[in-house]
Image: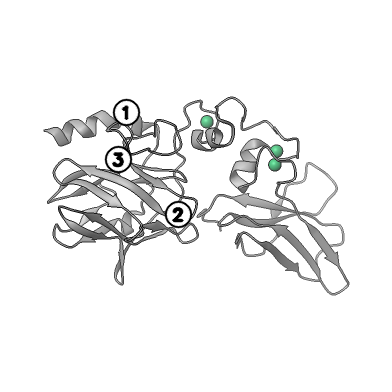
Amino acid sequence: MRVVSTLLLSAASLGALGQSNIEPIHSVARTEFIGDMEWRPGQFGASINQYYCSGFLYGANTGWIQLGYGIPLDSIHYRNNSPLDFGVNVEPSGALRGFAYGANIGWLNFEPIGNPKVDWVTGKITGRVYSANTGWMTLDSAENYLRITSIAPGADTDNDGLPDAWEISLTGNLQTLRSDQDRDADGATDLQEYIAGTSPLDPNDVLGLLLTSISSASRKIEWDSKSAVIYRLEVRNSFDFQSPWQDAGYPPQVGNGNIMSLTLNAQSSNTAFYRLHAYPPLTQLN
Ligand SMILES: [Ca+2]
Ligand SMILES: [Ca+2]
Ligand SMILES: [Ca+2]
């Protein structure tokens, strides 16, 4: 009965967070002593965004386990110092740290020894989680692993298209940034800067082509990449600003945090215009 009431209590706040982003065919973790643990037991399954986790795991022998209370009280990270502010946080590296709770088994500790972690490039979740009552839960093994196929959006209580955690971590409020505004006047909207992983408060941090070297043999373009952001080169063959941007036909590139480059083939039109389009980590293009 206590388990059911916990589920109902948190369903309202979870509604704002969207559905589980655990891939249905990679949703089961193994445990030492208590059988399989399902990370997507329906629409209120685990949801992992760039800052924190929410949602529920389920095991036939354990009942429901809550990954977080729903939305951290400071909108960014759970403090894990009260029953109303507990949960598993997500560090920029993808490390999962904090506490999950099951009424039947108590706390599960996401800590450095087991090092549970999301890989922002592949979406795979690796490592182990410890519970004093039930032992280790293994998130990946040779034949089995957990995976997310997108980054959950997280809470957006002011409905402006920007995750509250991102807004508040940068400005301390929900008013300064807006999706259709270009706060730092660098040509990219605040929403475009969120997607590209650039700062909406720094005009020197913006997605752009850094340098184009042109010779008769090749043209090379370079840009300052952000980790795990996906970049696709687009082309427009006309001065006409109404003409659409199209995929330039090069494989999407996954950012590595350093300067990246693409060498265009020599047949490229002399009058082509290029731009980079950024997509959030794990976006499936094609
Ligand atoms: Ca928002
Ligand atoms: Ca801007
Ligand atoms: Ca900027």
Residue 12: mark: 1
Q: Earlier in the sequence, mark 3 or mark 1?
A: 1
Tell me whether the residue at label 1 lies in contact with that at label 2, contact meaning CB atoms closer than 8 angstroms: no
Task: Name the quadrant of the N terminus.
Answer: top left
* Disc 2 to disc 3, C-alpha distance: 21 Å
Position of residue 108 measured from the top left corner of the image (x, y, whole percent): 24, 49
Q: Is residue 173 left or right of residue 153?
A: right
Q: Viewer-proximal residue, 105 or 248?
A: 105
Q: Is residue 62 left or right of residue 91?
A: left
Residue at screen point 29% across, 33% down: 82
Q: Which residue is under mark 2?
A: 94
Q: Earlier in the sequence, mark 1 or mark 2?
A: 1
Q: Is residue 181 left or right of residue 280?
A: right
* Disc 3 to disc 1, C-alpha distance: 11 Å
Q: What is the crowding at mark 2: few (fewer than 14 residues within 10 Å), some, or many (at least 20)? A: some
Residue at screen point 60% across, 42% down: 194
Q: Amino acid at mark 3?
A: Phe
Q: Quadrant of residue 37?
A: bottom left
Q: Mark 3: which secondary structure?
A: loop
Q: Which residue is under mark 3?
A: 44
Question: Assess mark 3: CB under 8 A from ligand 1?
Answer: no
